[in-house]
Image: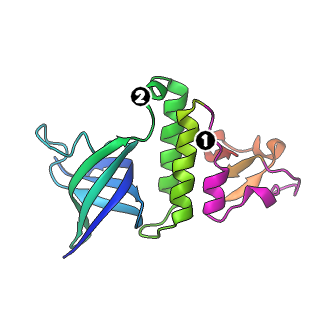
Amino acid sequence: MIEYFTEGIVLDKERKADFDGLVYLYTKDYGKIVAKTTGIYKPTSKLAGLLEPLNLVNLRIVEKNGFQITDALKIKKIVNNDVLKSKKFYQQAINLLFFIKEMTFDFQFDPKLWQAILKTFEVINKKRTPSYSLILEALGFSPKFAQCQICKNKPAKYFSKKDQVFYCRRCASKFPQDELILI
């Protein structure tokens, strides 16, 4: 059994059994981790409120037949409470979490990506619409040199999560908007 201690951002959680679940985290030292939680959906669970999306937490995780969260301590909400009251900025923060969850691989840490994530959330905390360019660049998709996949025009304004390519404004209008990220 191996034990890990790290900071992490809760990306998502889902119910796995009656009271058990999975928690998706992007951690400071290990990258994305999917960890089991036992009894998180019980009314008396001490971890239930700590392992909510948008929380920055200190974690103790053990690895034995997969990862299991054994303890957590909330550091803070990564998005300020006054920002969360705005439906627009709350949705932008949740979309950013899902983007990170979809675009990262398990146990592949990148310190540049960790910093890009924190800086992007700082923008949301200032009640400004975040740009995904720092995160895309850390993931290896530099918007600086991007051109439209279809017409080859620059600058590219959208990134497709599904196809992992860039599109200009005109060509992006041909695709479902929920698959595209404005950069």
Question: Does the stretch in magenta take in 130?
Answer: yes
Give the residue type at disc 1. Answer: Asp
Please state which of residues 69 and 158 is positioned toward the viewer in this rendering. Answer: 69
Left or right of 82? Residue 151 is right
Percent position (x, y) of residue 9? 40, 51
Work out whether mark 2 precedes mark 1 in sequence or the reverse, and give the earlier one: 2
Q: Which residue is mark 2?
A: 81
Percent position (x, y) of residue 118? 51, 49
* Residue 36 sits in quarter: bottom left
Give the answer, above or below, for where 115 lies relative to 182: below
Left or right of 175? Residue 97 is left
Please state which of residues 62 and 118 is positioned toward the viewer in this rendering. Answer: 118
Q: Residues within 10 Å of mark 2 (few under 14, many from 20)?
A: few
Q: Which mark is residue 101?
A: none
Residue stretch rendered in magenta on the structure: 128-156
Q: Are marks 2 and 1 in contact (CB under 8 Å)?
A: no
Query: Can you name the residue that lies furthest to the left here?
Result: 44
